[in-house]
Amino acid sequence: MGKLTRYVLIILAALALLPFSAVSADAAGSPKVAGIALDEQGQPLRNVFWNVYHQEGGEWVGLQMGPLLTDAAGRFEDSVDAGTGYRVCFSDSYYGLDYATESSYWFPEVRHRDTCWPDATSVESAQTWTAPADGTTTLTMTLPSEGLGMAPVDPFVVGAFEVGQPLTVVGQEGWRPTNATFSYQWYAYDGAASGPIAGATGATFTPTSAQDGKWVQAIVTASLPGYKPVRLGSQTNMVGALHAQLTSPLQITGTAAAGQTLTASFGQPTAAGHSILEWFVDGIPQPEATTQGSATSTFAVTSAMSGANIEARLSAYLTDADSNYIDGSSTYARAIVQAAGTRPTQPLSTAVTTAGKPTVGRVLTAPSGVTADPNATISYQWLRGTSVVTGATTARYKLRKADLGKPVQVQVTVNRPGWWNSYVGTSPATVVKKSLENGRLAVAGKARVGKRLTARATGWGPKPVKVRYQWLRDGQPIDHATKATYRVRKADKGTELQVRVTVTKKRYLAVTKTSKAKKVKR
């Protein structure tokens, strides 16, 4: 995908070949480019990274701000300079706060391929698009699915950042799926050039004199067959610089159980500086609990955190006389505990509904496609009211006399390999009713203007039943034509007339039937 900034030490995966379409629309004012990301079903893809690159110093440089994400319509729009050449890219690799909710993190079950316009595998090999004098050019791209999506955790490096002292990447215990394979590459940057450190491909790396005075970062790649790989970078820090020195290590005290409060504490450095303490639950940041400038931070454990890994991450750095950050002076530490109990179930992201007529003898069917994971285990439990129906544990359930007048629903549970939680969804309740005796529907009379047509609904039972009528003209309801008889009008010439009846009876399933059409002559 090229360099998202000049100095980011991340190598992105090769980008996939994708179909595209480009449509230009005239508009007054400066030129703009818009992009739309769609999945294979034509649905918009939100929270997809986008960028518009231009050449600078012989390389393609993107917008250095962000995150640059598509909106709910899968769209972005950006101003460009007329006559300048640009390259446009999408990357479905955002993992972070879902800005639509601002309360959850963006971990979609399916991830899609990345691409640069129109069908390139990298920004370097993409086609250049030259901005016109004005108007908006829209590029629509279809991104086929590449694999399942992971729930990653930002890598965190702990250690002294000194020559001869080991540095270690931590945080992988919160990564899902838990059976992903991790690989590592450490990078060094000296202010002018960056590159991978030869042989530095483990979770632990010990800097040598070659890295003294350089910034160091670890890139972690997680992969698993069937999943889209994830590449994330750790924080960076300078080897051999003057670092903040804690006077006592970071620790977590308290009982890690629902309803209890944990406390993270450490000894503040004696030199002037600043500190940030952040809390994470199974790798997901808890920003409301972040504490700055204090040697202690408290965190309330809830029942939703049962069984989870709870960690505190500390960043402490030195400041100058004007309270400015001193480059490379950071010290990092982490403490982790596991909350008591078992991780609770999570709601299915797919709505659960049933299909079939809710009447005795008929079959209700649970939905398919509740998960995209082919290795997931799906189980079913049918409920009558609030009680389980013994033995009703398949996707299909034949309704019984015992179900009459009772609400029936199905609970679907999904368990995925490498994911701690079970995912559960329950369908809306459907009240089971008796079946009406099947009747007949006919229309008597001639379909001519001025003549009367009569609907005859017979045989429905057991009696008494209530019959409602609606006359139709070419399949559409005719206003106020809701009686058993209908007088043909001039407006009906050349059309087809029908009647639709709805037969109801208390505690019985309503039945709707439509008659054969009668053609009205012109």
Image (tube, rainbow, N blue to C red):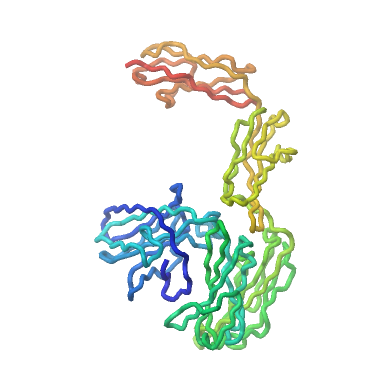
Count of labels shown? 0
- Nearest the viewer among 205 and 352 is 205
Residue under the point 60% across and 33% down = 356
Residue 81 seen from this side = yes
Percent x, y for residue 150? 57, 60
Residue 498 is left or right of residue 125, and the answer is right
Residue 277, image quadrant: bottom right
Task: From this view, report whether residue 192 is shown above or below residue 359.
Answer: below
Toward the front, the furthest residue is 199
Residue under the point 57% across and 17% down = 439
- Nearest the viewer among 113 and 242 is 113
Percent x, y for residue 61? 37, 71
Percent x, y for residue 8? 46, 74
Q: Looking at the figure, which quarter contains the N terminus?
A: bottom left
Residue under the point 42% across and 12% down = 452
- Nearest the viewer among 205 and 391 is 205
- Nearest the viewer among 513 and 184 is 184
Q: Looking at the figure, which quarter contains the C terminus?
A: top left
Task: From this view, report whether residue 289 is shown above or below residue 399.
Answer: below
Percent x, y for residue 265? 67, 77
Residue 292 seen from this side = no
Residue under the point 39% across and 20% down = 496
